[in-house]
Amino acid sequence: MLDDKTTMQNLVEDYRNSLQDLFGWLDSLAKRSENADKGHGMSIASRVSLLEQLTAECLDGKSKLEALTSKVTLHFLKLDDEISVIYNIKRCNGEGWRSDGSSE
């Protein structure tokens, strides 16, 4: 049972880390886009080049989002399976199950 809980915690932690990485990437992209928009002494050619790079990165970002989506789907299917197994074991043992996830 402890292994199941550890597995679930690891799945959730992996998801959180992946989501944090995606948000960090989006933050960086937004800041660099803002800098390119404002110029900050950059020539027009430099700004256009930077905007082209950011556009390419945005297109690459679609794969990042798709990877996170597939990871979420996989992780939550695993979590759902784990919870179902634990619930069924407790039911077979005659133990109650509270809405907060603890047993009676």
Image: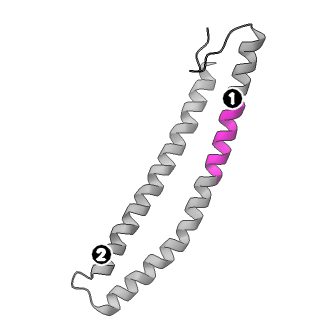
Residue 80 colored magenta?
yes
Query: Badges 2 and 1: C-beta atoms under 8 Å apart?
Result: no
Name the residue at 36% across, 74% down.
33
Q: Which residues are magenta?
A: 70-83
Dot 2, how many residues are within 10 Å of its Cα: few (below 14), some (14-19), or many (20+)?
Answer: some
Name the residue at 34% across, 92% down.
45
Q: Toward which corner of the image does residue 11 lie, by quadrant?
A: top right
Q: From the image, tell me which residue sits under label 1.
A: 82
- Give the Cα distance between marks 2 and 1: 46 Å
Q: From the image, tell me which residue sits under label 2.
A: 35
How far across and how far down the image is residue 32, in percent?
34, 72
Residue type, label 2: Asn
Name the residue at 44% across, 79% down.
53
Q: Toward which corner of the image does residue 26 lie, by quadrant?
A: bottom left
**Secondary structure at numbered mark 1:** helix
- N-term mark: 2 or 1: 2
How far across and how far down the image is residue 54, in percent?
43, 76
Q: Which mark is residue 25?
A: none
How far across and how far down the image is residue 88, in percent?
75, 19
How far across and how far down the image is residue 19, in percent?
49, 50
**Secondary structure at numbered mark 2:** helix
| Farthest left residue in view | 41
Q: Main secondary structure of the magenta part?
A: helix
Residue type, label 1: Glu
Q: Is residue 39 above or below residue 27?
A: below
Q: Is residue 62 above or below residue 8?
A: below
